[in-house]
Each structure stands twice: as structure tokens, then as C-alpha cells.
Amino acid sequence: MNFYKNRITKIDEYQNLNTKNKRYGLFLCIANICNAKCIYCFANHGDYGKEKGIMPSEIAYKAIDKFMEMTPKDAEAYIIFFGGEPLLAFKEIINTVEYTNKKYLGEKSYQFHIVTNGTLLSRERIDFFMNIILVLQ
Ligand code: SF4
């Protein structure tokens, strides 16, 4: 038990943390739906047992703003598009990338990642991802 207790950072110690080169991640579950039916799925085929849907861009913008607000200036921010299958929300991904770059490029250090089953990748989409900072997983 003490093992875990010692790893908890008290809120009043948070400001004194050395955050340089530390990574902070936002998993943006942008598509609560999937086009696959993997038998081993951990996410109930994308919806986690909840209502299926695509995250409205306005919600994604709010999540990005909150995440950037909470991420220390000298830390690296990872924005990870997740699902379900996030490429079902390709338009919303474009919106979110454009919003983030417009507001935070040059202000914050961040990069985009995506966790995808790859079935909806196309030349056009790969070209888009090649033009932003993105790591495919
Ligand atoms: S691709 Fe991922 S989210 Fe979709 S069914 Fe397979 S494991 Fe589940």
C-alpha cells in the first residue's frame, strides 16, 4: 500500500514537479463506434457498451483547450486520436488538428498520434497525416 501512496503527487506539490521533457497524453475518443468486429475487442466493438457516436468538434476543441491548460509549458503534449475506429471521424480529426495548430502552434510543444485498425486509410488520408506531426499505431 505504501508503494502506491509514495507515488501519489499531492496537489500542492504539483507546481514544483520537474516537468521538462515529461509527456502528457490526451486520449481523444473521437469515434465511439467501429467498422470491425474483432472477437478479442476490449471496447465492445468500439462503443464501450455506451451509445454509439462521433464526438462533435466543439467538444474536441474544449478537451484540447483543457488539456493544453493542464499541460506544463515545458512538457510534451501527446494528442492521441482513439476509438472505436477514429478514422470514422476523419472530418472531426481534420477540424481538431486545424483548431489545435491555429491556437497552439509555436505556443506549446505537442504531437498527434492515432490508434487505428488501418482499414480506412487511403492515399488522401495518408497524405493528410504526412503533413502533420503524427505517429501511427
Ligand atoms: S478494431 Fe479495435 S475497437 Fe474495433 S472491434 Fe477491433 S479491437 Fe474493437
Image (cartoon, rainbow, N blue to C red):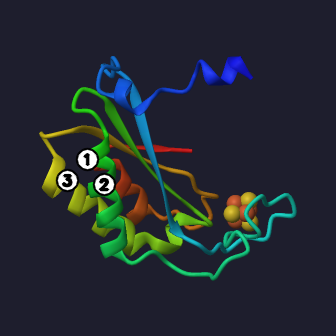
Image position of 122 (left or right of 57) = right
1 or 3: mark nearer the eye: 1
Q: Residues within 10 Å of mark 3 (few under 14, many from 20)?
A: some
Q: Residues within 10 Å of mark 2 (few under 14, many from 20)?
A: few
Furthest-right residue in this view? 39
3 or 2: mark nearer the eye: 2
Residue visible at 41% across and 30% down? 23
Amino acid at dot 2: Lys
Where does residue 69 sit, x and y in percent of width and height? 25, 47
> Where residue 69 is drawn, which disc sits there?
1
Query: Which residue is nearer to you in this view: 119 or 108?
Result: 108
Where does residue 127 sit, x and y in percent of width and height? 35, 56
- Residue bearing the label numbered 3: 101
Image position of 33 (left or right of 99) = right
The answer to whether the residues at label 1 and label 2 have Cβ atoms under 8 Å apart is yes
Amino acid at dot 1: Glu
Query: Which residue is nearer to you in this view: 21 or 41?
Result: 21
Image position of 37 (left or right of 61) = right
Give the quarter of the image for residue 5: top right
The answer to whether the residues at label 3 and label 2 have Cβ atoms under 8 Å apart is no
Q: Name the quarter showing ligand 1.
A: bottom right
- Residue bearing the label numbered 2: 66
Disc 3 to disc 2, how far (Cα)? 15 Å
| Element under disc 1 | helix
Identify the image quadrant of the N terminus: top right
Amino acid at dot 3: Asn
| Element under disc 2 | helix
Query: Which residue is nearer to you in this view: 136 or 104?
Result: 104
Q: Which of the marked residues, 3 or 2, is nearer the chain's N terminus?
A: 2
Identify the image quadrant of the C terminus: top right
71 over 68 or under it: above or below: above
